[in-house]
Image (cartoon, rainbow, N blue to C red):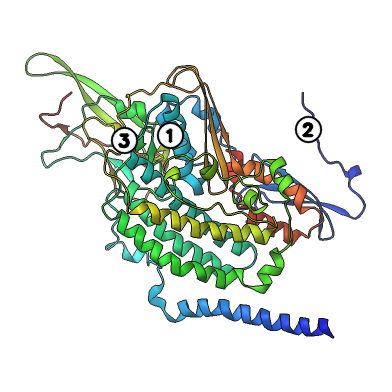
Amino acid sequence: MAEIKIITTDEIKTDEYLVNMGPQHPSTHGVLRLLVKLEGEIVHNVEPHVGYIHSGIEKMTEALSYPQIIHLTDRMDYLSAHMNNEAVCLCIENALQVEVPERVKYIRTIFDELQRLASHQLWWCASGMDLGALTAFFYGLRDREDILDIFEETCGARLTLNYSVPGGVMFDIHPNFQSKVKAFIKKFRKTLPEYDKLLTGNIIFQNRTKGVGVLSKEDAIAFGVTGPTGRASGFSCDVRKHHPYSAYPYIKFDEKLGTDGDSFMRWKLRMDEMWESLNIIEQLIDNIPEGDIAVKMKGVIKLPEGEFYQRVETGRGEFGVYIVSDGKKNPYRVKFRSPGFSNLFTINHIAKNWKIADLVAIMATFDLVIPDIDR
Amino acid sequence: MKSTINYIAEIFRAIWSLLTGMKVTAKYFFTPWNNVTQQYPENRDTLVMFDRFRGEVIMPHNENNEHKCTGCGICEINCPNGSIEIISKSIVNEEGKKKRIIDQHIYHLAMCTFCNLCVKTCPSEAIVMGQKFEHAYWNRTSMTKVLNQPGSKIMEGIKE
């Protein structure tokens, strides 16, 4: 039996405190509990305790059929709901060797990028609030509303989309979809520089983030850090670029890479990614080919015996779906590789010897979604 | 000396960066028509949801109190959370044949995740997603609904 390590009072030096940050702390963005060992204000050790919102999704999937699994993945990383849906769909399609129509690939990719924009907008406003900028919170949510309206018009839901189904998408795009997306891009290209004016250029903000919590490239690779957090350290890990799926092979885009790996770089990289997402959508939105929105699948989907893996790039890193099938209509075992889990556990390594306020800045730029960590 | 100049310059840069940010907020302060706040409970009469909005599962009936549900149970099988329960009964029709028809189509709103799988898989398009989104009730039992109206029967010409 594995031994559970509990810090006892003997291990704590005279001037050290053991303080719980969370599970109800506003800047942990959910029910994450960090056990922080402090000397005064200086962090000596951070121990993340996860499991406060563990919902057992991996186990639940073993009792559900394949189309039913998809709606559960909405609830893991709720800010990247469509990418999670797509990962499961792609995994099932790969296993059955189904080629989806071109139209589906384009629609899925546009939705991916819109979802990434919405995710980064929420990250921007929430982490702005963590660092003491309340105005950012309102501005970010205001602009996110436009994307959610586009989602709502096409697929009827705002957050838990459940838009992808095995073999295609659930509905065809709404007649207003293209014009609305174009209007949004035009508007957001004007709004995005305001974000920079409001926060990125601010001296107080820069002093709080520049050089704080440096994650080196070697550590990023060793800890398996992916997504914008890993790329800010110079680790080229964009799944869209290295293992392209859906319509990503057809388009040109840059993988933004940072150098410093500090909190400001992570911030800057996500802002750059928003510009890149706008470019990707602009390349696709006028060229959606005509055709079916789904391949006709069997009523009961049964995967062949074997193991299947598919990864996608979500708003916060590489999301993987690993399905073990024994040929029945339910999967034998499903494992989700969530980006937040790997990203979170670097926190002890990089937050050591920083102040407690810097720990908040580090967590803000890590973009943690707690149900994604616990699933 | 140099550090003092740097210190003062830093203060002015900080003030300038604050003013740059304040310019953005001032722009929205003086152009309130750009704000998007909706007066929600007051605008209930004019508030229209998008037609694909997934509010709740409903079963449309026509003017003769007829619905399209055959009671096949496909929605019940496809529901991931067990929020649909179908109770069917067998009747004897005019030709003297035994026939199974729907007695009650029970919908547990409290369990529903609005994933749309029931609506998508329904072969006779008997259930659709409704527009209502105000799902607050005083007790849990009122969240269990019977979708087919009392005394309703199946529309003619629906294949079973």
Asked which secondary structure carries label 1, the reply is: helix
Give the letter of the chain under mark 3. Answer: A
Q: Which residue is mark 1?
A: A89
Q: Nearer the viewer, mark 2 or mark 1?
A: 1
Closer to the N terminus: mark 3 or mark 2?
2
Q: Amino acid at mark 3?
A: Ala
Measured from the top left, where is residue B80 in percent x and y?
41, 31
Task: Report the residue marked by disc 2.
Answer: A4
Q: Position of residue B2 (x, y in %)?
A: 82, 83
What quarter of the picture does the C terminus of chain A occupy? top right
Say which element carries label 2: loop
Question: The N terminus of chain A is located in which quarter?
Answer: top right
Q: How far across and how far down the image is residue B51, in percent?
A: 27, 51
Q: Earlier in the sequence, mark 1 or mark 3?
A: 1
What residue is drawn where x is 89% and y is 47%?
A12
Q: In which quadrant of the rendered view does residue A96 lie? A: top left
Asked whether, in this view, residue B71 is left or right of residue A353, the answer is: left
First reached walking from the N terminus: tag 2 or tag 1? 2
